[in-house]
Image: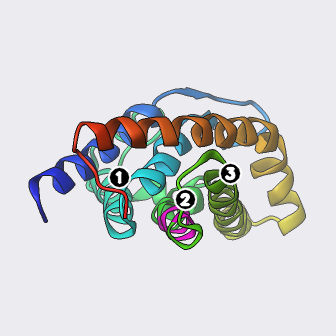
Amino acid sequence: MKTKQLTMTAMFTALTILFAQIILPLSFTPVPLSLSLLPVYLSGAILPKRYAVYSQLVYLLTGVTGLPVFAGFKGGPGVLFGPTGGFLIAYPVMAFLTAWILELVKKKTVLGCVPAMLAALAACYLCGSLFYVFVGHVSWVKSLSVTVFPFVLFDLIKVAATALLAPVINKSLMKAKLIQIV
């Protein structure tokens, strides 16, 4: 791994850690409103597939070791087996999907980013809600009602914001010769 790629990968891990702490706990669900999806989307929109995945795997591995990197400064394997575990486990998948779809459409524009990020969000919802079915011992409909439906509008705003930011960030990073768009 080249120094620039390693640095960019580590930067997205750090951004995920930072943004995971920006939360708003909600009384009716164990899942807080969080900004942690922003760097997950951005990692996929900016980094090549494998480095986007690495950035999120490092985030998960850092948290599993007990370092307080998950939302609310939590850490340890118990978080991955808790109510939000499925969402966290989806992060590398989301980064991969975003990068892969953008690679397929061959344009890292707003119009390219939106479907890629929506596919990633769908994967997040699927993993998180199904995982909560088992952890919470509830039906899938009940799981969706507490882990997905309350967040749809907020998550669509995050997709829109990130889809607008990603091309601008990509252009700036290319100009600084920190990344190459292939």
Q: Residues within 10 Å of mark 3 (few under 14, many from 20)?
A: some
Label 3–label 2 contact, CB within 8 A: yes
In the picture of the structure, the residue carrying the numbered disc 3 is: 111
Give the image location of residue 164, x and y in percent.
60, 36
Q: Quadrant of the C terminus?
A: bottom left
Residue found at the very far right of the displayed protein: 141
Res 87 quadrant in image = bottom right
> At label 3, which amino acid type do we have?
Leu
Q: Nearer the viewer, residue 173 or 90?
A: 173
Label 3–label 1 contact, CB within 8 A: no
Q: Residues within 10 Å of mark 2 (few under 14, many from 20)?
A: some
In the picture of the structure, the residue carrying the numbered disc 1 is: 76
- Name the N-terminal-most of marks 1 and 2: 1
> At label 1, which amino acid type do we have?
Gly
Give the image location of residue 24, x and y in percent.
63, 26
Q: Is residue 175 left or right of residue 123?
A: left
Q: Which residues are magenta?
A: 96-102
- Name the N-terminal-most of marks 3 and 1: 1
In the picture of the structure, the residue carrying the numbered disc 2 is: 107
> At label 2, which amino acid type do we have?
Lys
Specify whether residue 52 is painted magenta.
no
* Residue in view at x 78 percent, y 51 percent: 148
Q: Nearer the viewer, mark 3 or mark 1?
A: 3
* Residue in view at x 11 percent, y 60 percent: 2
Q: Nearer the viewer, mark 1 or mark 2?
A: 2
